[in-house]
Image (cartoon, helix red, strand yellow):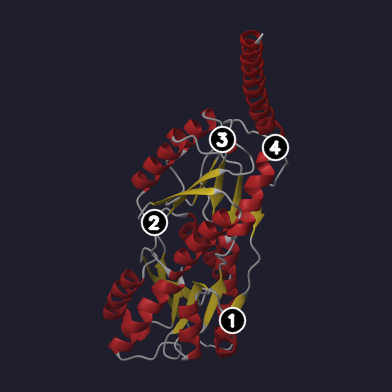
Amino acid sequence: MKRLFKGKKILLLMMSLVFLLSACSSSGTGGQSDSSSSNGSGKSSDKLVIGFSQVGAESEWRTANTKSMQNAIKDAGHELKFSDAQQKQENQIKALRSFIAQKVDAIVFSPVVETGFETVLQEAKDAKIPVFLADRAVDIKDDSLWVTFLGSDFIEEGRKAANWLVEETANTEGDVNIVELQGTVGSAPAIDRKEGFEEVIKDHPNMKIIKSQTGDFTRAKGKEVMEAFLKSDGENIDVLYSHNDDMAIGAIQAIEEYGLKPGEDIKIIGVDAVRGAFEAMAAGKMNVTVECNPLFGPQMVDLIEAHLAGEEIPKRVAVEESMYTMDQAEELLPTREY
C-alpha cells in the first residue's frame, strides 16, 4: 500500500508541475498582449525607439534644440538613438540608413540641406518608419515621404527683420547699404530668410544689399566674412543682416576690431534670439533679434505619439515666436532659457 501511495503521490506532483508550467506560459503570452499594444514593428507603443539626426552643433540655437529634443524623448520614457551630422549631408544619410537598419519606430531629422534625400526617405517609407522633419524642410515632390514638419516660418522671420529695418530707417535720407551673412548654402533657413527679407526691401529702392556671402551659421565664419566685407566696403556699410545670431556675434567682434561701433555705426539684425544676442543687445552692440524658438522637443514627441496612435496631424506645424529689440534685452536676459 505504501508503495502504491508513493507512486500516486509522484504522479500527482508531476501533473501539478505540468499544469503550473502550462499556466505560466499562457499567462505570459496573454499578459503581454493585454498590457501593451503593438505598432507595425511589433514593439510596445508605450516605449518607442526614436532616431534623431541633428544638423550639428554650429550655434547656441542648435545646442538648445538638441537638448530639448533629447530631454523630451527621454522624459516621455522612450529610447533615443542620436546622431550628429556635423553639417554634412553624407553623414546624415548614413545615420538615417542606420536608423532604418535598427528598425526604429520613428525618425526625426533636421536636414542639412533641402535636396538629395529622396532615396533614403523612400527607404524609410518602404520600411514603414514614419519620418518627422524638425526645424528645416526638404524640397521633395512626394510629400508622402514625411509625416509633418515642425518648426519656424523662416520666410516670415526674414520679413520681420526687414520690416524692423524699414521702420528704423524711415527718416533716413539716401541709400541704406546692407551686408548679408547667409546661412549654410542650400539650407531651408538660409533660402527662406533671404527670400523674406528681399520680399520686403524690394519695395524700398534706397535699401541695397551690397554684399552677401555665407557664414555657414557659425560664429567663426561670421567674423571671417565680416572682416572681408569691412576690408572692401567698411565705411559704406550701414546695416548687417545676419541669418543667425552666432554669425552676428562673430561679426560684432570684427566690427570692433575694425574700429567701428556695432549697434551704432552699423545696425545689427540677427535671427534666433539666443542668450548671446540678448547679452550683445544689453551691451548696446546689437539692435534686434528675430526669435526662432528651438525648445519644441515636447511638441515633437506629442506629434510622434499622436501619429503612431492613428491620429491625423497637420502637414506643417508652426512654432510661436516673437522679436526682441535692444531696449528689451536687459530686462529679458535673466529669463532666457537658451
Amino acid type of the residue tagged 1 in the rendering:
Thr
Residues at badges 4 and 3 in contact (C-beta under 8 Å)? no
User: Between tags 4 and 2, which lies in front?
Assistant: 4
- The amino acid on which the numbered mark 4 sits, given as a three-letter code, is Ser
Q: Is residue 172 above or below residue 131?
A: below
Residue type beneath disc 3: Asp
Nearer-N-terminus badge (1/3): 3
Callout 4 crowding tier (Cα within 10 Å): few <14, some 14–19, many ≥20: few
When the figure is inspected, residue 255 is found, relative to residue 214, above or below; the finding is: below
Q: Residue 35: which disc?
A: 4
- Residue 335 — which label? 1
Q: Position of residue 235 (x, y in %)?
A: 34, 86
Disc nearest the viewer among 4 and 3: 4
| Label 2 SS | loop
Q: Secondary structure at mark 1?
A: helix
Q: Earlier in the sequence, mark 2 or mark 3?
A: 3
Marks 2/1: CA–CA distance: 33 Å
* Local crowd size for mark 1, using a 10 Å CA cut-off: few (<14), some (14–19), many (≥20): few
x and y percent of residue 50 in the render? 53, 45
Determine which residue is flagged by label 3. 142
Q: Residue at x 53, y 81 (%)?
A: 288
Residue 42 vertical placement versus 156 (above, below): above
Residue 253 to residue 9: above or below: below
Q: Nearer the viewer, residue 157 or 279?
A: 279
